[in-house]
Amino acid sequence: MSVSKRKFKAEVNKILDLMIHSLYSHKEIFLRELISNASDAIDKARYLSLTDKTINPTGDEWQIELIADAEAGTLTVRDNGIGLTRDEAAEALGTIAHSGTKEFLKLLESNKTKDNPELIGQFGVGFYSAFMVADQVTVLTRRADAAPDEAICWKSEADGNYTLEDITKETRGTDVILHLKEDEKEYLKEWELRKVVKQYSDFIEYPVVMDVTRNQPDPDDKEKSVEKTESETLNSRKAIWIKDKSEVSEEEYREFYKHISNDFNDPARTIHYRAEGTTEFSVLLYLPKERPFDIHYQEYKIGPTLYVRRVQIMDHCEAMIPPYLRFVKGVVESADLPLNVSREMLQDNKVVNVIKKNITKKVLDNLATMKKEDLEAYTTFYDQFGRILKEGIHNDFERKDAIAELLLFESTKTEPGKKITLAEYLERMPEDQKEIYYMTGPDRATAESSPYLEVFKEKGLEVLLMTDDIDDLIISSLGQYQEKELQSAVKGDLDLGDSDKKEEKQKEYSDLLALMKEQLKDVVAEVRVSGRLRDSAVCLVSGENDLDPQMEKMFRAMGQNVPQGQRSLEVNPDHPLIAKMQALFTADAKNDRLEEYVDLLYDQALLLEGDRPRDPVAFAKAMSQLMAEGA
Ligand code: ADP
């Protein structure tokens, strides 16, 4: 029998050192790593056994076994997979052959891994994670095609060395025996192992079995109980995403959704398909019914769980999905990605980009179908996630038209709570209407009562009411729908078919307007006759390309520097007050009253916008005086 003592390669020592001294949370993932290795080993053996009948001649079930020995303080992960030869053991368990090792070491050193256990599996150094919980690890292994006396015992205490010894092993495959550290003995407990397997390895294809001892009533004496030990399978083994749709029940879909989402509601929609072609992958995605409370938090994790050949690579793969679909939950499995793929590698990966594109289209298609088939259900969904979905208009140029079809808005002609699509708006607008009108505001009531809508009301034109904080940004990005411009009721010079009259009035009042402009030159860019006012005397209007006042306020509140837009004061030529000013002006262009009126009008315009007059005290005083004079 030959025992040989060998030294680990330098990078292994480094990894071990960091594993032992830097990783404190989620130590339980060592079990996921060992089970995943066992599963890989079985995959290989199973594949060989297809052509080599000596590999599993008796047709034993492929399985992974957990053996907790409380007396010895050991936990064994046993498989009947491919096993290792002496050379393979030295290579696989003494070096690190993966390309990502350097990056991984950097990451470990930067401390980012503490709360990111998935990183360990990603970098293909999973075996060494055993040393997070064990001070000694023994591996007994026999290649599937080797004789019992050709087996190997690998042993290490993570002290820079390991030993290799020839041994005899009756069964094929590998036992990884962990001599648990004193304070890691919880991994001997049935419930703990059960929990960890369920959490991380539930969908491993092979059964993960464990002997479970229970007290049962003694059949001979009902007063007494006897201990009975039975082998139990801990994982559900249901990789439903790679099954055919016809093989999965609604119930199974729902159960799986709850398992991966921590949502106790049923999903609003399930999307399950397999893509075939140059890149092959399976997708099982869900649209939730309700917005999770943490979806706006920075820590909210985006993206489906990524599996590569049934092994979970990361629980949230954000590279797979655009941020505006961050409410989507699910699983993607691809065989075209390497098992040791890292987040960094995923960022600009061809396969990932193909999958992401495909998923994005599928989700949007599904939303379109949902809207078509059951508008009520879609509206309920939209009320929860529309605010997020519409970010896509701004961020996904390629798909902004598809997303525009999914938008819903209330309007001046819908009942509160009822929404219409842009297509419906087009369908019911008068033939000679050239643009789609919209109005932004903090809520429906405020938007509806705004003076900016006066002319639309009078002419019976429908105006979409937009109450989400980002609507103005979204609509600017969209620009047009079906070649119709989207025109804000609060921005730009409106032309609703009265341009002749407007021009005429503009001429008539031009001197008065010039006087007003001169007095207000520091606060407005222009003073002009309005095409939108009917009852109010004045209003302030932003430039066509400026942020609307609501957005401007929002950005300012967030502490951002917003350039002051070019605002115009619009004047209602039919208002008695304006007529009176014109009369005063014609009589005496230097009348002091005019200056007072101009200031008052401008402050009124600020008030109508929901803002404050520039000097509230002066404003109140001037008002009171006017009222007293009028009385
Ligand atoms: P990875 O599994 O990503 O390659 P690990 O550090 O987990 O990285 O394992 C290193 C290597 O050790 C594996 O590639 C495999 O060759 C070998 N190995 C680990 N566990 C087993 C096992 N249970 N049976 C056979 N080989 C194993």
Image: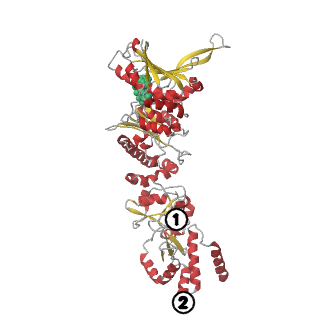
Q: Report x, y in % for residue 158.
A: 49, 25
Label 2 is placed on what type of residue?
Ala
Q: Can you name the residue that lies furthest to the top here?
A: 220
The quadrant in which the N terminus is found is top left
Assess disc 1: are there few (<14), some (14-19) or many (≥20) residues with their C-alpha within 10 Å of its C-alpha.
many
Q: Which of marks 1 and 2 is in front?
A: 1
Q: In this view, does 419 lie above or below 520?
A: above
Q: Report x, y in % for residue 389.
A: 46, 50
Give the structural element (helix, strand or loop) at label 1.
helix
Q: In this view, does 595 lie above or below 29?
A: below
Residue at numbered disc 2 = 587
Which image quadrant shows ligand 1?
A: top left
Which sits in the foreground, 541 or 74? 74
Give the structural element (helix, strand or loop) at label 2.
helix
Q: Is residue 60 above or below residue 446?
A: above
Instruction: Choose the circle earlier in sequence order: 1 or 2.
Output: 1
Is residue 347 shown to the viewer in this render? yes
Marks 1 and 2, how far apart in space? 37 Å
Q: Report x, y in % for residue 291.
A: 53, 46
Label 1 is placed on what type of residue?
Pro
Is residue 237 shown to the viewer in this render? no
Residue at numbered disc 1 = 549
Assess disc 2: are there few (<14), some (14-19) or many (≥20) residues with their C-alpha within 10 Å of its C-alpha.
few
